[in-house]
Structure formats: structure tokens, C-alpha cells
Amino acid sequence: MSSGFASSALQPGQSLARGVCRHLRGHDFVSVEELVPTSGLRVDVMALGPKGEIWVIECKSSRADFQTDRKWQGYLAWCDRFFWAVDADFPVTLLPDDTGLIIADSYDAEILRLGPEQRLAPARRKMLTQKFARHAAIRAQMARDPGCVSAF
Amino acid sequence: MSSGFASSALQPGQSLARGVCRHLRGHDFVSVEELVPTSGLRVDVMALGPKGEIWVIECKSSRADFQTDRKWQGYLAWCDRFFWAVDADFPVTLLPDDTGLIIADSYDAEILRLGPEQRLAPARRKMLTQKFARHAAIRAQMARDPGCVSAF
């Protein structure tokens, strides 16, 4: 595999997340995975746009995966726009109309619907941007210096 | 090596940067390397603190490395605090008194002098925090998905 990690090693949701993050780079958005905006919530993908926009993307690999999610409405308060990312076989009519929709696979994705924008308040945007920066920097440091973990 | 990368593969300045970044984590600062705050400037280490503080650390491996640096005063406008990081053999009396000082090796570091604080204006801090976030997220994505590069 030229992509370094075999796709088969990723869980279905992580595989969608990979394609989503790749696609968003084409829109000049950078992304992190598994960020915790507040205690008890963990988003699959948080993306930061060129103007500081913050998007949250939840990746659902199956109908059951969506139907057992009791927390998604809690994510709306932590982003300017919210999206579902699902594969091409997902029954998209299950998803609420007033949310964004991305069709993805492991390699790429396509934004089908933006959904409404609800702009974050400045203080929350500032806090989330800092949290995003810290999350990303820690992961980047772990990658370039795996020994840093044992240093603490 | 348990640290993943052999220290010998790093340039002397990068080796100091690694120790600096490890040490700063102990102060709850996260770090990126080689960030460009503005065209024509590239800082060795930019660190982001728990309260949004932004520090710049320039790593100097030798007297000559310091004496040929004609740009360092330009970094002062892009951080709340500025530091030199040098190894234990560096002639520290060469360094200006009113700058921060860190003694480092590949594995750790120690802050000897904080130097003065000159707080960034809010708009510049916001811009730098976003730039830091984007820089870190791109490096983290390249690490977890090396194939993302070829996708563009």
C-alpha cells in the first residue's frame, strides 16, 4: 500500500474519517480525529477552515451505528456546521434534513449538503481553536518523537 | 532505540528542538517545529501554553550558528516570550540578557531564564493560534495517513 496504513486495519468509521479528512484538505480545511470538545463528548472529525470555521463530522458506518447515537445533537453547540459522513450504501433518508451530508470512502469524499450554519460565539470559537491546536500538536509530536511519551 | 528515531539522524538544532518540545510538555505547553509566522521567517519551535500563551524558541547548536542569525529580532513580534535553546557547552554570555534561555539536549531541557513578556495583540494571537493549529493538524494528518499527500 502506498498509503502507509492498510485500509483494512481501520475500523469502518475511521476509514470514512480518513476519506473525509483527505477531501476537506481540498477545501483548505485541516482536520483532527477524536477530539473531546467538552467532557462526555468526543467528535469523530473536527475541521478548521481557512477563516477559522469549525466543522464537526460524525462518521456512521451503518444504520445501527446511527440509530444508537444518542449524543449527536449535543455536538451542534460545538461547531459552525455539522455533517454526517456515510458510505454510498447508507440509507440517507434516515438522516435529518437540516444537517450536512458527506458521502465518503477510505480514499475520498464528497460534500452533498452543507446544512445550516450556526456561528459559534467568539469565546467558544477561541477555546475550541486552542483545543484543536493542542490536540493536533500532541499527535504530531507523538508521530515525530515517539519517545516523548515515555519522557513523562 | 525506544525513542523511534535515532538521535543521530537529527541535525544538531533539531536535536535541541526535540528536547525543548519534550520539556515544554511538562509545563503543559504543546509545540510545533518549523512554523512560518509570516513570509520570510521560520521559527525553530513555537509553543502554545494552557492559557493560549505563545512562545518562540530558537535553537542554536554553535557560536557560529548564533552569530550568523540576522533575523532573530524579527521573531520578537510573533510571540509573548522569546527564548534561545542551546546545549550545555554553548557560550551563553554571547546571548542578550533580555531574552529567555533554555539549556537543552536531545532528551530534555531546562528553562534557566524566562526573559521579559511582551503580550501579543489579540488579533495577532488569534491569527497565530489558527496558524499553529493548521500547521500541527497537517503534520498529524501526514503521520496518520501518509497517503493523503498523494491525494492532491
Image (spheres, coloured by chain):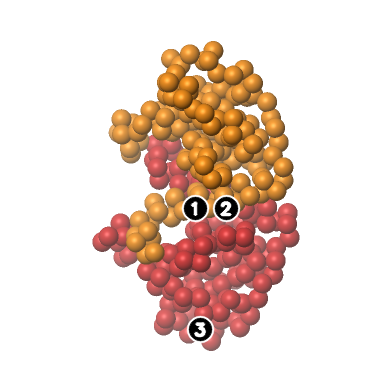
Chain colours: A red, B orange
Considering the image in quadrants, where does the C terminus of chain B appear?
A: bottom left
Identified by mark 3, the residue type is Val
Q: What whole-number distance in Å separates the C-alpha atoms at marks 1 and 3?
A: 30 Å
SS under mark 3: helix
User: Disc 3: which chain?
Assistant: A
Using the image, determine if residue B149 lies above or below residue B78. Answer: below
The tag earlier along the polypeptide, 2 or 3, is 3
Residue, x 50% and y 39% (percent of image)?
A: B42
Residue B29 in the image: above or below residue A76: above
Q: Label 1: which residue? A: B137
Viewer-side label of 2, 3:
2
- CB within 8 Å, label 2 to label 3: no
For disc 3, the marked residue is: A92
Residue that mark 2 sits on: A132
**Residue B89: mark in rendering:** none
Residue at left 56%, top 72%? Answer: A83
Q: Residue at x 42, y 30 (%)?
A: B13
